Image: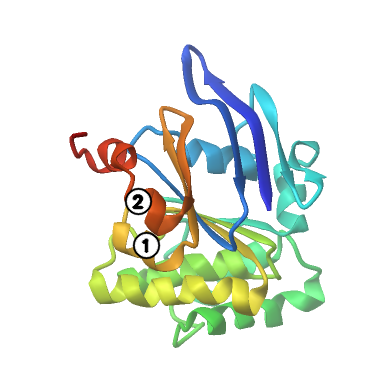
Amino acid sequence: MISIAELSVDFGGVRPIDGLTVDLDAMVHGVIGPNGAGKTTLLNVVSGFTPPSGGSIVIDSIDVFELSADQRARWGMRRTFQTEQLVDRLSVFDNVLVMAETSLPRPARHDASMAAIEFVGLPSASVAAGSLNSLERRLAELARALVGGPKVVLMDEPASGLVGHETEQFGALVQRIPVELGAQVVLVEHDLDLVSTVCERVAVLDFGRLLAQGPTATVLAEPAVRAAWLGEALT
């Protein structure tokens, strides 16, 4: 469980996270909200890319602010980004291996990389990343995040650019992560169908504050949530 208490982040005169307190306690937990709500900033703080100005984050009794970004990765925190991180000239295997090198001893890296590639269902580890289609690129990005036994996987709009059946395939894969790998998934996503399908619970952010939280279907039906996230008028 990820316990966030009174978390704030300041960028000059802007406060994208403003006294946020929330427990992300589901094995697949969604974080949703309109553009500018602070979702990506939250993932950046949890993963160590953005320093907080106040508050705390505790994961399984570990104060993550006592760990550097590298230490969090070695502990088992993984991350995908909105912007693809693949190097097109490298093979799928080498792209995944780069991540294995950050967290695993040398003898374990090859097998762990191949296991991650097999888990996401990519047909070949030897092809260049530049030859992959949109879904395969997303799967390769996910394999990079899953290599080496993660404990927490933070995903920032991983289904961006995918079409219906591809999103369904990707969602089914996300649901397998807690069951087969034992890792918690925190999913930031705008795709309502994907969130509804894979997330047991959601937290809704608006202007860096918690607007609502709870079981996904219940929260998504709340008028205030639909007004903030989907732009529907309150009646």
Mark 2 neighbour class, 10 Å CA radius: few under 14, some 14 to 19, many 20 or more: many
Element type where label 1 sits in the image: helix
Tag on residue 196?
1
State which quarter of the image contains the C terminus: top left
Q: Type of residue at label 1?
A: Ser
- Furthest residue to the top? 13
Colouring convention used in this rendered image of the protein: rainbow
Element type where label 2 sits in the image: helix
Determine whether label 1 and label 2 are within 8 Å by CB.
Answer: yes
Mark 1 neighbour class, 10 Å CA radius: few under 14, some 14 to 19, many 20 or more: some
Q: Type of residue at label 2?
A: Leu
Q: Quadrant of residue 122?
A: bottom left
* Whether residue 178 is situated above or below residue 180 in the rendered picture: above
Q: Position of residue 197 (x, y in %)?
A: 38, 68
Q: Earlier in the sequence, mark 1 or mark 2?
A: 1
Residue found at x 72% / y 74%: 109
Residue found at x 62% / y 54%: 25
Q: Position of residue 231 (x, y in %)?
A: 21, 38
Residue that label 2 marks: 220
* Whether residue 89 is situated above or below residue 77 in the rendered picture: below
Q: Quadrant of residue 196?
A: bottom left
Q: Position of residue 69 (x, y in %)?
A: 70, 44
Side of 106 relative to 6 (left or right): right
* Whether residue 175 is situated above or below residue 82 in the rendered picture: below
